[in-house]
Image: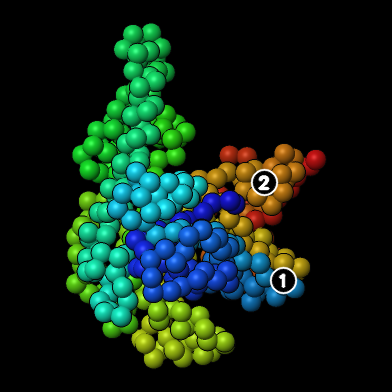
Amino acid sequence: MALKCGIVGLPNVGKSTLFNCLSNAKAQAANFPFCTTDPNVGTITVPDERLNRLSSLVKPLNIVPTTVEIVDIAGLVKGASKGEGLGNKFLGNIRECNAILHVLRCFDDPNVVHVDGQVNPVRDKEIIDTELQLKDLESVEAKLKKFEKPAKTGIDKEAVKTYNVLQKVKDVLESGQSARAAKLEENETPYVADLHLLTIKPVLYVCNVDEASAKTGNGHVEAVREAVKGEDAEILIITAQMESEIAALETYEEKQMFLADMGLDEPGVNKLIKAAYKLLKLETYFTAGEKEVRAWTITHGMKAPQAAGVIHTDFEKGFIKAEVIGYNDYISLGSESACRDAGKLRIEGKEYVVNDGDVMHFRFNV
């Protein structure tokens, strides 16, 4: 599915180092601003222990994980909404993403230049928030002007609805909050969908800390936590430099030894990828057979025919029924045949909402 998470932040906060850990597409990483001038796109494998467990039972010829796209976007500076720095190019690249991973520098190191001369992640967050909010306000005001006259007459009911939703978002933006704070209802979002608002996108704040703070965080992280507590957003702590060292190790065993020495259970990038997947409201179902065990990406709430269409459009067009086994049932009973014998294989129709982890086969006719 063509959904993307964009890594954003001020210049020199660790975005490209982090991207390099996530992807085989290596972005240049250097100690000066605007090192990244074009967005780098990486297709990232989503770590999922369920896929491994299913594969250990089925023993297929091939194992195919699911993926998510991560985009490393050029660093932003104050005034970007007015074209400063890489301004409009940067904002355009964010507009194409479905969710935002906002990297904040939460470590002190005199050898790594900060674009504003001093480490202050809350200020850095506010700089980017302000620039994105100003750009969104510009978009909302332009559309409001188009609907102001027809809305005031009251004749065109759709124009009235559009105007009211736009005004709701405008009020929030003018108060210095992101469009997410408007908390639009599902029936209101279509009225602003065409604007591709930057601050309405879901966001995960990634606190890039030093090695000593990898497990518990530090004062900078606590300041960020306090600053975002009123937002519908999550925080993830990661040490980009340490993650790059882990990524450079050649074998799984070497990586596990490194993690054990650091007192960590898994690489931070694994947690980040899973968080990005969740941020995009993505879920996974599986197909399992002797030839292949495969993870398929769907959006939360997707029904069986649409899930079948992820494999091939013909599956959706000719959908008849879905054979479904719950993941836990499959693991506890050990095979499809055992699930069938135990009555744990269900036949579901077109209205079935797929659960995360379902193991499925589709019946279709084209």
Residue 204 seen in this snapshot: no
Residue tagged 1: 62
Residue at the front extreme, as displayed: 84
Picture coordinates of residue 80, whole percent (x, y): 35, 49
Residue at the location (35% across, 39% down)?
136
Looking at marks 2 and 1 on the same chain, the residue that comes earlier in the sequence is marked by 1
Report the amino acid beneath label 2.
Answer: Gly
Q: Residues within 10 Å of mark 2 (few under 14, many from 20)?
A: some
Q: Is residue 273 above or below residue 210?
A: above
Residue 64: x percent and y percent?
66, 67
Question: Which is more toward the observer, 58 or 3?
Answer: 3
Toward the viewer: 305 or 183?
Answer: 183
Please rate how many residues cluster around mark 1, counting C-alpha atoms within 10 Å: few if below 14, some from 14 to 19, many from 20: few
Residue at the disc numbered 2: 309
User: Which is more toward the observer, 233 or 85?
Assistant: 85
| Residue type of the residue flagged with mark 1 | Asn
